[in-house]
Image (spheres, rainbow, N blue to C red):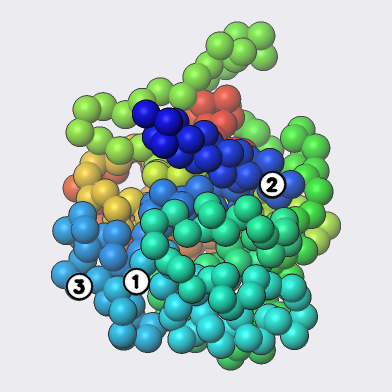
Amino acid sequence: MPASSSSQLGDRKLWKNVWKLNVPQKVQIFICRVICQGLATKYNKWKRHLEIVSTCQVCGIDPETEHHGLVVCSHAKLLRRAMRENWELPDENMLRNGSGEWLLVLLDTLSVEEASRLALTWFVRNEIVHNSKMCPIAGSVGFLKNYEALVLSTRQSSEDRKGKGLGAPPGVQKQMSSRQSVRWVPPPSGWIKINVDGAFSAESGKAGVGVVLLTAWRVIFHASSAEKVEALACKEGVRLAGEWERRPAVLESDCATLIAALQNKKDSHSSLSFVLSEIIEACSSLPDVKIQAVWREQNCVADELA
């Protein structure tokens, strides 16, 4: 069947356009989630019976699909109009077709910068939808300028980019040579696992978090310490689990001091007290949560995302 073969070859070529983009892996992952309809939109959660309605809560008009949130929603249109004063963006006519793998096809004509900027607008929307922070359009554009500078910056070396002391899980003493074979351990049957990690720069105060549940990530711009970033990553992970998978969960992090504080349900660092209470509160939305420290090698996916 020549037509089918030609179609498959074309699809493979389009997917190659995603992986050849010279953007951070975070942006590639986000683009893949859009293409595969894997974002936590109202429509996707409605399909999984996690929401009663699928209507966009920002504009209240259409179902909140990936295309609606990124392109069609009234807020997305206003933000894009303001962004055009500073950046190159795809022509509006190129964005109208939201059928099927619309972004995958669009990538064939987009520059690296255009693809990244389209993806970054989703995180402004997240602040509105999940944190109820309605920011003026001008403020959102300023946010995206800083966001782009952070996301597209060159990665620091893997050894010290985390900015935190890497302690072994409590009670575990092993030589580095024995850690080479340590791997991620899947959760028990019927459970989910939440792996989190944080990266922190003491010089700039900038930070990022990596959260793995169904492959998700968010970026935070300012934090006071590496432990604070790790705590925020834990909070994001548990909240994400509550949105998508209301099942018993295993929460893992390679920050031993934070895990100890969570297990004891108390904290000697007063700056973390509020975040720790938020994590504990978020855990109450799940049937059961086990909290444990792991080696970085067992947390490699979240480590890479951060």
For marks 2 and 1, give the CA distance: 27 Å
User: Can residue 207 be seen at all in this image of the molecule?
Assistant: yes
Depicted 48 relative to depicted 4: above or below: below
Whichever of labels 2 and 1 marks the residue nearer the N terminus, that label is: 2
Whichever of labels 3 and 2 marks the residue nearer the N terminus, that label is: 2
How far across and how far down the image is residue 221, in percent?
Answer: 67, 65
For marks 1 and 3, give the CA distance: 10 Å
Q: In screen coordinates, is 202 left or right of 254?
A: right
Residue occupying image coordinates x 74% and y 47%: 22
What secondary structure is found at the residue carrying circle 1? loop
Nearer to us in this view, 113 or 217: 113
Q: Amino acid at mark 1?
A: Glu
Q: Amino acid at mark 3?
A: Val
Q: Which residue is mark 3?
A: 53
Q: Are marks 1 and 3 in contact (CB under 8 Å)?
A: no
Nearer to us in this view, 41 or 170: 41
Say few, some or many: other residues with alpha carbon within 10 Å of mark 1 (under 14 / 14 to 19 / 20 or more): many
For marks 3 and 2, give the CA distance: 35 Å
